[in-house]
Amino acid sequence: MTRARFSVGIDLGTTNCALAFVPLEGDAGTEILPIPQWDSANVIAEAATLPSFLYLPEDEAVWVAGKHARNKAADSPGRVAHSAKSWLGHHAVDRSALFLPWGSEDVAREQKISPVQASALLLGHLRNAWNDGFAGRGGDFAFDAQAITIAVPASFDAAAQRLTLAAAEQAGFPETVRLLEEPQAAFYHWLEQPENARSLSAAISGRNPGTRHVLVVDVGGGTSDFSLFEFHDADAQRGPRIKRIAVSDHILLGGDNMDLALAHRFEPQLVNDGELLSGAQWAYLVARSRDVKEQVLASEGPPDQAFPVVLP
């Protein structure tokens, strides 16, 4: 087997997916793969992330992944599957059963997909994006020839991990694909920054030498993870020693819940007393709440900056 050229890391997220890669030889740094996707019904564009939404257009049998699918969650919620990763970790359902989009009457049962299939479609889109981007560079640049790692919640149990690997298999990933806990991946990335590693080493060897503990809090789109790491210096050749010593239970709390909470907060301001939004209006409001949340978190404006919410 030809030695891999790149280490490829994939974040299969509840809300967004991303793919990063780094050469296994040389000093080049990590790069993010631009992911082509439908930006609208007529435009394809590249973006650093792939929204984890899948849209089934009417009279078609092919699910569309990405930004256009996310946009359609507002006006065609019954034809959009999302939060597949949260479903993968949900023990109360058969995660190989066809029930996404959840509660939809717009998609026939035989056209629905399982959380495993939805995850496979997202992973397959990333695999195709890589192969299209490196087309013509030779077989050793093919996706299947690389060292592939998928990040998963630290609180995923063995069943959820197996289902993630099953989705990767459906997407055509090589059998050598590995899983890595997301907080651990974040901690490794943090340690890649020389100033961070130096400050941690200095704290260990300073006035109160000894082991230090690092808590990594990962609030994601559908889950929140808390991982505790033990860190202490070794000899110069081996480098620091890191051990994950504790992890939280599986907590289905994340960005999705924030969107719902905002929508519930907005609803009384958009309807008359005693009235409720229709299903379509509620789906639109949740999608708009998601947009507002991301605008607020990305904004560097004044504390009293206004973000209007309009309900058609």
Image (tube, grey):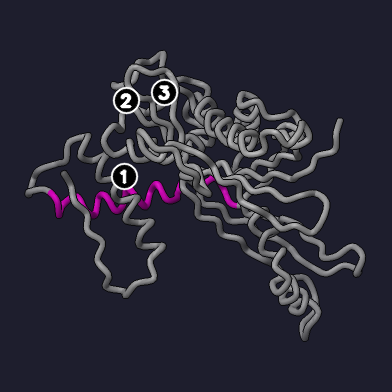
Q: CA distance from mark 2 to mark 1?
A: 16 Å
**Residue type, numbered disc 2:** Ser
Q: Residues within 10 Å of mark 3 (few under 14, many from 20)?
A: many
Q: Earlier in the sequence, mark 2 or mark 1?
A: 2
Residue for badge 1: 287
Whether the magenta-drawn stretch holds residue 262 is answered as: yes
Label 2 to label 3: alpha-carbon separation: 8 Å
Q: Amino acid at mark 1?
A: Ala
Residue 206 colored in magenta in the image = no
In depth, the one of 283 and 159 nearer the eye is 283
- Label 2 with label 1: CB-CB less than 8 Å: no
Quarter of the picture containing the N terminus is: top right
Q: Is mark 2 in CB contact (under 8 Å) with mark 3?
A: no
Q: Nearer the viewer, residue 18 or 105?
A: 18
Write the start and end of the magenta stretch as one range. Answer: 248-270
In the image as oriented, which residue stretches furthest toward the front?
136
Q: Is residue 260 left or right of residue 237?
A: left
Disc number for residue 256: none
Q: 77 and 115: which one is in front?
A: 77
Q: Which residue is mark 3?
A: 99
Element type at mark 2? loop
Q: Quadrant of residue 299?
A: bottom left
Q: Nearer the viewer, mark 2 or mark 1?
A: 1
Mark 3, secondary structure of its residue: loop
Which disc, if any, is residue 104? 2
